[in-house]
């Protein structure tokens, strides 16, 4: 009986809490966004050279598309009032 009680206490002591899970989620998201940033920084100079003078216009268009997608997603979650 004492042995089973000690096993249960070990399980309870090693279980993760909601805060641990949330912290792991944000840590993973931060790592993923860092990889995206590295990828964008890696291809940006080549893209700027390839597109010449058109890249500032295309960059604004790309940012506006990402903006619209973000607000559409927030609208689906009812975070932002539409």
Image: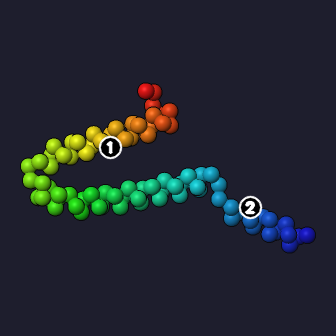
Residue ID for mark 1: 66
- 5 w.r.t. 72: above or below: below
Say whether residue 22 is left or right of residue 30.
right
Q: Quadrant of the N terminus?
A: bottom right
Density class for disc 1 (Cα within 10 Å; few <14, some 14-19, many ≥20) is few
Q: Nearer the viewer, residue 38 or 18?
A: 38
> What SS does tag 2 mark?
helix
Residue in the picture at 38% in, 41% down: 70
The residue shown at (53%, 58%) is: 24
Label 1 vs 2, first from the N-terminus: 2
Residue 72: percent from left, percent from top: 41, 37
Residue at x-position 24% and y-position 63%: 42
Q: Relative to 22, is 72 above or below? A: above
Residue 76 in picture, x, y percent from top left: 48, 36
**Residue at the extreme left of the image, as rendered:** 53
Task: Give left or right: position of 39 versus 54.
Answer: right
> Which of the labelled discs sits on residue 12, or is there none?
2
Quadrant in which the C terminus is drawn: top left
Q: Is residue 70 left or right of residue 56?
A: right
Report helix, strand or loop for mark 1.
helix
Above or below, 57 relative to 49: above
Q: Position of residue 9 (x, y in %)?
A: 78, 64
Q: Residues within 10 Å of mark 2 (few under 14, many from 20)?
A: few
Q: Residue at point 58% right, 55% down?
A: 21
Does 16 sit left or right of 5 as displayed? Answer: left
Residue 80 location in percent, x, y?
A: 45, 31
């Amino acid at each position: 009986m004492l042995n089973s009680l000690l096993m249960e206490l070990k399980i309870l002591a090693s279980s993760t809490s909601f805060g641990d899970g949330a912290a792991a989620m944000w840590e993973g998201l931060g790592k993923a966004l860092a990889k995206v940033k590295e990828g964008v920084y890696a291809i940006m100079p080549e893209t700027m050279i390839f597109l010449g003078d058109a890249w500032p216009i295309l960059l604004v268009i790309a940012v506006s598309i990402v903006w619209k997608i973000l607000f559409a997603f927030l609208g689906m979650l009812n975070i932002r009032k539409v």
